[in-house]
Amino acid sequence: MLRRYAVDARLEELGADAPTSAGAALAIGCGEAEIVETHMFVCDGLPVVALIAGGARVDEVKLATVAAVRKVRPAEPAEAFAVTGFDPRAVAPFPVPNATRVFVDKALLSPETVWIGAGTFRHWVGLAPADLMRVTGAQTGDLAAD
């Protein structure tokens, strides 16, 4: 998919699993805020992806506002797997063809490079935030809890 969109990206295979944003940041050598966490939610019954900086938490009220929906809840692990095909703890932000919408927290637009999980705890891809937006077709919003 990165080739199809002509994304200039850097793939890192870590020597050990890094299942947390803090662990991934340490292994990659970046700040935790440069790690993209991918979270699945069910918004008014439809699957939605929320991308947020490592160490932050999605505010469900803010997500509901940005998505213009009434009801938001975290997806159950089985729901996340059904939508993404990934282990719910290692969801890559794309491809997620069964998600109805993707939202990116505005804080992820600031770093020069952000790091996304590539479907395992050992594989991470660094790319520009603009490329992340383009490939995911995401909308931007204020999603992070205060």
Image (cartoon, rainbow, N blue to C red):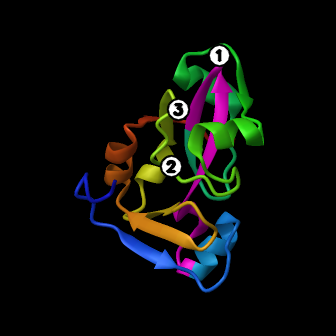
Tell me if mark 3 has few (under 14), some (14-19) or many (20+) residues whose alpha carbon lies within 10 angstroms of its own: some
Q: Can residue 58 be spotted in the picture?
A: no
Q: Residue at image x 27%, y 59%?
A: 3
Q: CA distance from mark 2 to mark 1?
A: 21 Å
Q: Can residue 120 be spotted in the picture?
A: yes
Q: Which badge, 2 or 1, comes first in the chain's sequence?
A: 1
| Residue 77 marker | none
Q: Which badge, 1 or 3, comes first in the chain's sequence?
A: 1
The residue tagged 2 is: 93
Q: Amino acid at mark 3?
A: Ala
| Image coordinates for residue 47, horizontal then vertical, percent | 60, 28
Residue 40: in magenta span: yes
Residue nearer the viewer, 29 or 39:
39
Q: Amino acid at mark 1?
A: Asp
Q: CA distance from mark 3 to mark 2?
A: 10 Å
Q: Residue at image x 70%, y 67%?
A: 19
What are the residue bounds of the magenta stretch? 28-49
Residue 74: in magenta span: no
Name the outermost residue toward the bottom. 15
The residue tagged 1 is: 44
The residue tagged 3 is: 99
| Image coordinates for residue 110, horizontal then vertical, percent | 42, 55
| Image coordinates for residue 71, horizontal then vertical, percent | 70, 17
Under tag 2, what secondary structure? Answer: loop
Under tag 1, what secondary structure? Answer: loop
Q: Residue at image x 56%, y 60%?
A: 119
Q: CA distance from mark 1 to mark 3?
A: 13 Å
Under tag 3, what secondary structure? Answer: loop
Q: Residue at image x 66%, y 33%?
A: 41
